[in-house]
């Protein structure tokens, strides 16, 4: 499955574990303009459930997830659209 998302900004949370990727996403979202898409990079598998749950709680739009293996482990790329301030 190859789905490609276009992000306006990227947030690198590699090496951070729950709840830090969500905390960092929340902080970045405060600066992000409505309508923009944020790509969040994480190697914490918890983000698979955490990011959609955060979006539901905050009213933002979860666009999807891409998973890659860089040879040292899995990298998860989540894409979130800011739909409300």
Image (cartoon, helix red, strand yellow):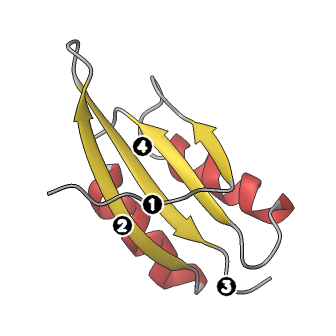
Crowd rating for badge 4 (residues with CA inside 10 Å; few <14, some 14–19, many 20+): few
- Is mark 1 in CB contact (under 8 Å) with mark 2? yes
Crowd rating for badge 2 (residues with CA inside 10 Å; few <14, some 14–19, many 20+): some
Q: In the image, what residue occupies the spot 47% across and 27% down?
A: 14
Where does the C terminus fall, quadrant-wise? bottom right
| CA distance for labels 1 and 4 | 24 Å
| CA distance for labels 3 and 2 | 15 Å
Percent x, y of residue 59 = 58, 87
- Is mark 3 in CB contact (under 8 Å) with mark 4? no
Percent x, y of residue 29 = 73, 62
Percent x, y of residue 11 = 62, 41
26 shown above or below 57:
above
Where does the N terminus fall, quadrant-wise? bottom left
Q: Which residue is mark 2?
A: 64
Mark 1 vs mark 2, foreground winner is 1
What label sits on residue 18 in the rendered view?
Answer: 4
Mark 3 vs mark 1, foreground winner is 1
The earlier-in-sequence mark between 3 and 1 is 1
Q: Nearer the viewer, residue 7 or 40?
A: 7
Q: In the image, what residue occupies the spot 42% across and 34% down?
A: 17
The earlier-in-sequence mark between 3 and 4 is 4
Crowd rating for badge 1 (residues with CA inside 10 Å; few <14, some 14–19, many 20+): some
What label sits on residue 83 in the rendered view?
Answer: 3
The earlier-in-sequence mark between 2 and 4 is 4
Q: In the image, what residue occupies the spot 22% across and 55% down?
A: 2
Crowd rating for badge 3 (residues with CA inside 10 Å; few <14, some 14–19, many 20+): some
The earlier-in-sequence mark between 1 and 4 is 1
């Amino acid at each position: 499955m190859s789905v490609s998302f276009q992000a306006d900004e990227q947030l690198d949370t590699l090496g951070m574990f729950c709840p830090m990727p969500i905390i960092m996403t929340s902080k970045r979202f405060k600066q992000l303009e409505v309508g923009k898409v944020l790509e969040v990079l994480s190697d914490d598998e918890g983000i698979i459930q955490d990011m959609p749950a955060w979006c539901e709680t905050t009213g933002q739009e979860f666009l999807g997830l891409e998973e890659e293996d860089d040879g040292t482990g899995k990298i998860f790329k989540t894409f979130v659209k800011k739909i409300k301030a």
